[in-house]
Amino acid sequence: MIASYLLLLSDTTVGQTLGCSGSSARAPEVPVLTQPPLPAPGARWRDIAPARLLPDGDTAVGFARHVYARVPGPYALGGQFAGVPGAIYITPSGPELTTTLWLRHGDELDLNDPRDRDLRFAVAGPADRVTAETPRWEAIVNDALAAFRADAPAARAWTAFLGPDPAQGALRSHDLIWSDQLETPVTVGPLALSSPDAWVHTIEPSPHDRTLLYTVAFRPLQVSGSTVSFTGPGAAEAAAVQLDLLCQLLTLATGRVWTHWRTPEVLEHPDAADELADAWLRRASRLPHLPGRLPEPQALELPGWLPAAWDRLTAGTSASTTAAEALTAFDSAVGLLTSGRPSDAGARFQAVLEGFSRRARTAKERKEQALAHVASRLAALPGQRAEDFTDVAAAIAMTGRRDGTVHRGARYGSERRRNMPVRMLSINGDEAHTYEQRVETLHRLCQALLLEELAGIPVDPAPLLQRHQDLNDGVVIW
């Protein structure tokens, strides 16, 4: 993870990027180092620290700042080089050190063991200078490591805005307006949710005629939180991960796809949240094409199980990881389904079902255990046996269609007409539309299974079985 953040350091001065000691208000001219000296073949990569000490990009940059602060000279060139993937280099500008320091996770340059993520360093340059300067580099690295261990990350507050994903109206040609808002603030895990008294709106092209526009309007959710990090970008990344989980839970709870409308902004002072919100809402409410008359706000009722579901998903156990992966697959599938990609959505819903196959070792076992789990939930009445519903479970899951999409790229829904809103009913019905309705049944099944898993709400098989039977009987469901 070091390299992804140290892109910020490439061809910049220490002062500009890291704020280290020795920087000046006016940066000196820095030459561009097109190809830094590379470690010699067979060069020794010396251990610095175990992977657990630097688990992510934020901690890696925190450590790198201490390294840069100890490099002699007015500035140091540093960054990535394509010839050494996954590593970063630091080349001082002054005469005290004439070699280049390389840092990387793992031991081998080309055949890095993915299980070996310990941090190591090597020194590159003329052989005699490498021998002479390696002790100095080792002292710099060890001193930086000691300072990093004593350095405490800071708590950083942030705020962001969420709302419905406009892509879920991609198959419609009329305005999409959601007027519900929270009446009182809600807390989910470490996040505080509230509803500003404002509308946000944008315009989307009509699927009938893309020169025509329709409105997407809603009451936004403001989300505030705090993360502990060494850097502002690290805090923003941690906040984005939390927002992703929140959006997934909101999609499950409300049946509406949620997304960010304003990425997390790390706040410089306590009052900055109100200032940022006011400025963003003023701009968002001035977008064109807002209908002249908007409905009165309605109450957005979020279910009481959300905080407990958050705690379960973030518990750090194997069960919580499995549940989180199933929820992620569900959120992705709903987004695909509502934006006009039902075949891909069907494959993702399959991933939700197979997420309940926790003891499976092979793909065949995962499918079998997934269908057995579904069958057990469809057999809800006294005296019913799960094995009697195996065929129905397989029919609802449409495993064969999933395999066709994943392995051959087959499309079974309106994607075949590029989601153009044109349809024709005949003696054979509309196969593409019928397939999409079957995917919708699968959607409802996955939602019910996740609500049982995360909220403790038992699956009600009756509406699922009735809908499945209606489709088999040729009942047109719009």
Image: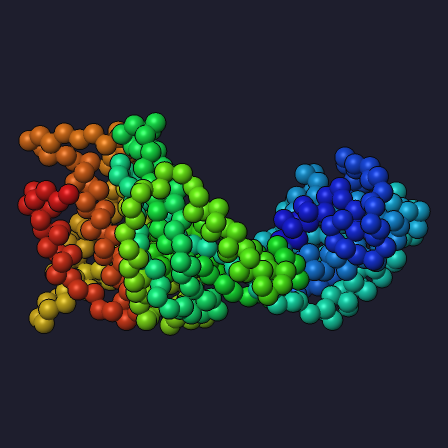
At 38% across and 72% down in the image, what residue appears? 308
Foreground of the two, 147 or 348: 147
Pinpoint residue 444: horizontal percent, then vertical percent.
23, 55
Pinpoint residue 44: horizontal percent, then vertical percent.
78, 52
In the rendered image, the residue lying farthest to the front is 292
Pinpoint residue 165: horizontal percent, then vertical percent.
37, 47
- The answer to whether any part of residue 109 appears in the image is no
At 32% across and 37% down in the image, what residue appears? 214
Q: Is residue 193 shown above or below 10? A: below
Q: Is residue 246 shown above or below 151? A: above
Left or right: 315 with respect to 362?
right
At 12% across and 61% down in the image, what residue appears? 462
Pinpoint residue 106: horizontal percent, then vertical percent.
66, 54
Left or right: 139 with respect to 219?
right
Q: How many numbered discs sit on the rendered protein?
A: 0
At 13% across and 44% down in the image, what residue appears? 477
Residue 170 occupies quadrant: top left
Residue 197 occupies quadrant: bottom left
Judging from the image, the colouring scheme is: rainbow
Q: Quadrant of the C terminus?
A: top left
- The answer to whether any part of residue 199 appears in the image is yes
Foreground of the two, 137 or 363: 137
